[in-house]
């Protein structure tokens, strides 16, 4: 098969490398405004110079549609790239979020249906073995029906500072609100596990820590100029030098030497003081959701954690399940008759899996590539049709956070449809 790539950053590279290196498919074209990333993809995949572009639209308008297009550009570029590609008949693997704008999400879904094109959204958690096992356990019904779910995304304090304070996803006007950019995954997971539709959402949260009022006395705009850097855990040298050659240091510069990283600290966004950036996304947010089947869910998104993974607690009629996607395990317990009954708990170890997101990236790519074959009869687990609702939930949660009101999803979607008309 032949693939083209728009957005040669980390996520686009992961997907295209898997298609090329593991599955043996060809990457025939690349587009990225960053000449270093573009050149790296060109060299990595042996792409001819006349199929390397600075702009995604140029690739779409120049290259005849091949088997599929991987779109991993910035959030607010997804709509233009995807709609243009659909007009030309491309099948698409689209990085989440579909778009920060709920109306654009709906428009992309409708255009894909109109054109008969396949779009798979990179909701990789639907493919992660731990969450697949959890879904199967719930569907098996041994613990009765689900009553409530408590899901937490522990972003990790250093990850929060890297990606959502200094990094690409720091500002909702440039990319998305954090609950959309980081956690449409989680909205999608709750939809999938409950097997229902969201009825109402309320949400609270704010940017409370990473702002100028919390800057230490004597701090500077950049870590290398700061008199209190030695006592600051966010000092760029502490954050990135130990991971030279690996994530997150490799996000700063291709020159993974001490000299290269220090130049990035002096000149690039990752050398800035975390209390003096142009960030505006929440560093913590809590959301309560009621589903049409009466299941309730709470979701907590927090950058104020040491750990950097998801934990989940599923409460059923006859027992409960605790999941930890870092340990790769599920703990299952049936309810007892009284407090003195022996307490037993079964621990299910999912084990080590290949790839990022607990094996989700690999599962996603295998499903997407399979869907492109003529004999494939069905719909990807994270198709555009299945994925739009999670984005509407994220938009509704953000509206609730800002307005202080509970958002009812039927009315919210109807308002979007009326605005479209």
Image: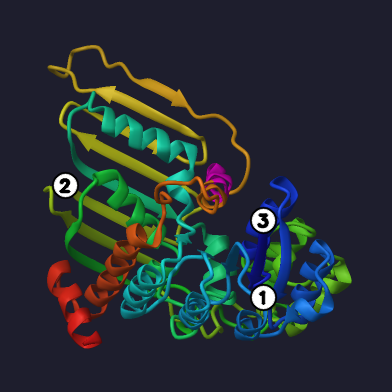
The location of residue 75, given as percent across then percent down, is 49, 76
Q: Nearer the viewer, mark 2 or mark 1?
A: 2
Q: Residues within 10 Å of mark 3 (few under 14, many from 20)?
A: some
Q: Nearer the viewer, mark 1 or mark 3?
A: 3
Q: Residues within 10 Å of mark 2 (few under 14, many from 20)?
A: many
Q: Which residue is mark 1?
A: 270
Lower sequence index among marks 2 and 3: 3
**Magenta-tinted stretch:** 357-366
Q: Residue at x 75, y 73 (%)?
A: 37
Q: Which residue is mark 3?
A: 1
Q: How many marks?
A: 3
Q: Residue at x 86, y 67 (%)?
A: 258
Q: Nearer the viewer, residue 90 or 30?
A: 90
Residue 55 position (above or below residue 136):
below
Q: Residue at x 56, y 46 (%)?
A: 366
Q: Answer whether residue 307 is visible to the viewer in this image.
A: no
Q: Determine whether the residue tagged by mark 1 lies in a helix, strand or loop.
A: helix
Specify whether residue 143 is painted magenta: no
Mark 2 and mark 3: span between their CA atoms? 43 Å
């Amino acid at each position: 098969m032949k693939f083209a790539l728009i957005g040669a950053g980390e996520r686009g590279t992961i997907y295209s490398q898997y298609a090329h290196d593991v599955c043996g498919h060809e990457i025939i074209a690349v587009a990225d405004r960053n000449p270093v990333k573009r050149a790296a993809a060109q060299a990595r995949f042996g792409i001819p110079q006349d199929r390397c572009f600075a702009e995604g639209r140029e690739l779409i308008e120049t290259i005849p549609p091949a088997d599929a297009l991987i779109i991993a550009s910035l959030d607010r570029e997804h709509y233009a790239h995807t709609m243009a590609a659909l007009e030309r008949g491309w099948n698409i693997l689209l990085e989440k979020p579909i778009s920060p704008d709920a109306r654009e999400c709906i428009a992309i879904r409708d255009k894909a249906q109109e054109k008969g094109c396949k779009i798979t959204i990179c909701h990789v958690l639907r493919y992660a073995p731990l969450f697949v096992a959890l879904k199967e356990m719930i569907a098996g019904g041994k613990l009765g029906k689900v009553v409530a779910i408590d899901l937490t995304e522990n972003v990790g304090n250093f990850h929060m500072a890297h990606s959502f304070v200094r990094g690409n996803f720091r500002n909702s006007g440039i990319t998305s609100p954090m609950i959309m950019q980081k956690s449409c995954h989680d909205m999608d997971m709750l939809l999938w596990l409950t097997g229902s539709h969201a009825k109402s959402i309320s949400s609270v949260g704010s940017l409370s820590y990473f702002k100028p009022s919390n800057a230490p006395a004597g701090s500077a705009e950049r870590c290398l100029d700061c008199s209190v850097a030695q006592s600051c855990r966010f000092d760029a040298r502490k954050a990135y030098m130990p991971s030279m050659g690996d994530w997150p240091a490799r996000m700063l510069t291709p020159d993974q030497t001490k000299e290269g990283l220090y130049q990035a600290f002096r000149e690039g966004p990752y050398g800035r003081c975390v209390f003096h950036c142009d960030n505006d996304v929440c560093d913590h947010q809590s959301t309560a959701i009621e589903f049409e089947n009466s299941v309730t869910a709470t979701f907590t998104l927090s950058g104020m954690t040491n750990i950097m993974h998801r934990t989940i607690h599923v409460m059923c009629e006859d027992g409960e399940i605790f999941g930890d996607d870092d340990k790769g395990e599920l703990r299952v317990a049936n309810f007892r008759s009284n407090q003195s009954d022996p307490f037993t708990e079964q621990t299910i170890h999912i084990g080590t899996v290949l790839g990022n997101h607990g094996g989700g990236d690999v599962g996603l790519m295998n499903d997407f590539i399979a869907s492109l074959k003529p004999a494939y009869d069905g719909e990807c687990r994270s198709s555009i049709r299945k994925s739009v609702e999670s984005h509407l939930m994220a938009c509704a949660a953000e509206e609730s956070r800002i307005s202080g009101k509970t958002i009812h999803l039927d009315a919210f979607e109807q308002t979007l449809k009326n605005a479209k008309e």
